[in-house]
Image (cartoon, rainbow, N blue to C red):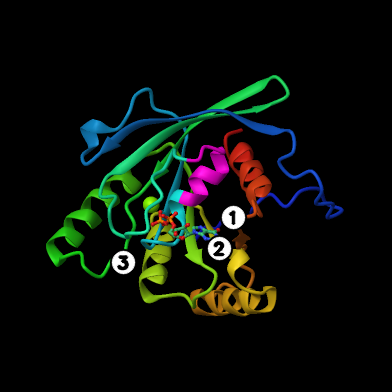
């Protein structure tokens, strides 16, 4: 079982310059895949984003890359049925690193039929189990809610595949800090990992962006 510790900066706890030296110099849509033959080439390191429909995944991708319309932000859940690959270049001083940001279809959309869910699961499983370049999976969970069984199932599936998982608590601007801490504590109890690192994020305020960029950068080393 592997989880990923987000880069929380220097050992002295100084938080001021997380991700400060890192800039996104390029972010572009590359490909959508419904089968393996459609994965993009060249093969690059990949950071995968997954979560329930409406959890704020598209917003997070846009906020991370600072491109307002890169991922389609939709108020209607359950729309994306493909794996979408974005090519992103990060730069620190004169060093550049390129990776694919991989956007998986949202899970847990109630109106999706069982057959569609099954073929979704097979396709996603194939991607997750055969892509050796995956550095970690960012699993987005809405900070306003307790962990849902489908979130737990996804977490266990990912860690069962040996993939490092970074849970990201989304929409932190929408509730108070104590309520957020209460929910995250419930997630940890439910997953039975008392010290599970969880990265708080808000696409509205940019909270967590520097930490996430640092974590991505370090995973590309
Ligand atoms: N206040 C706030 N709203 C957010 C945040 N992230 C997403 N949303 C809203 O939540 C809804 C769903 O977001 P979206 O990014 O499309 O979710 P996705 O289905 O997971 O891709 C939209 O109305 C967003 O504007 C956030 O960090 N703060
Ligand atoms: Mg979306």
Determine the main secondary structure of the stretch shown in magenta. helix
Distance from disc 3 to disc 2, alpha carbons, whole Å, reads 18 Å
Q: Quadrant of residue 78?
A: bottom left
Q: Mark 2 and mark 3 in contact (Cβ < 8 Å)?
A: no
Q: Which residue is mark 3?
A: 108
Q: Residues within 10 Å of mark 2 (few under 14, many from 20)?
A: many
Q: Nearer the viewer, mark 2 or mark 1?
A: 1
Residue 204 marker: 1
Of 112 and 187, the residue lying toward us: 112
Query: Residue sitting at 68 percent across and 45 percent down?
Result: 210
Residue 171 marker: 2
Label 1 or label 3, whichever comes before in sequence order: 3
Residue 32: x and y in percent read 29, 36
Horizontal side, residue 116 vs residue 163: left or right: left
Q: Secondary structure at mark 3?
A: loop
Q: Residues within 10 Å of mark 1 (few under 14, many from 20)?
A: few
| Above or below: residue 180 compared with residue 54 | below
Of 171 and 75, the residue lying toward us: 75
Distance from disc 1 to disc 3, alpha carbons, whole Å, reads 24 Å
Q: Mark 3 and mark 1 in contact (Cβ < 8 Å)?
A: no
Whether the magenta-drawn stretch holds residue 60 is answered as yes
Query: Residue sitting at 56 percent across and 74 percent down?
Result: 188
The residue most toward the left is: 115
Query: Residue sitting at 38 percent across and 22 percent down?
Result: 42
């Amino acid at each position: 079982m592997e989880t990923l510790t987000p880069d929380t900066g220097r050992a002295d706890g100084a938080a001021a310059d997380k991700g400060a030296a890192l800039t996104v110099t390029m972010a572009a849509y590359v490909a959508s895949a419904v089968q393996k033959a459609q994965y993009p080439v060249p093969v690059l390191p990949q950071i995968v984003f997954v979560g329930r429909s409406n959890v704020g995944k598209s917003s997070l991708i846009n906020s991370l890359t600072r491109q307002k319309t890169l991922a389609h932000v939709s108020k209607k859940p359950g729309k994306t049925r493909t794996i979408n690959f974005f090519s992103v270049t990060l730069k620190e001083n004169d060093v550049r690193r390129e990776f694919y940001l991989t956007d998986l279809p949202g899970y847990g959309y109630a109106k999706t039929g069982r057959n569609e869910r099954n073929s979704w699961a097979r396709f996603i499983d194939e991607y997750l189990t055969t892509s050796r370049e995956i550095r970690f999976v960012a699993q987005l969970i809405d900070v306003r809610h307790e962990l849902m069984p489908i979130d737990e199932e996804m977490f266990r599936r990912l860690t069962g595949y040996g993939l490092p998982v970074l849970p990201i608590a989304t929409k932190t601007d929408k509730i108070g800090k104590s309520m957020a801490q209460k929910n995250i504590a419930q997630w940890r109890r439910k997953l039975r990992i008392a010290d599970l690192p969880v990265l708080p994020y808000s696409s509205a305020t940019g909270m967590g962006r520097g930490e996430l960029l640092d974590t991505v950068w370090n995973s590309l080393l």
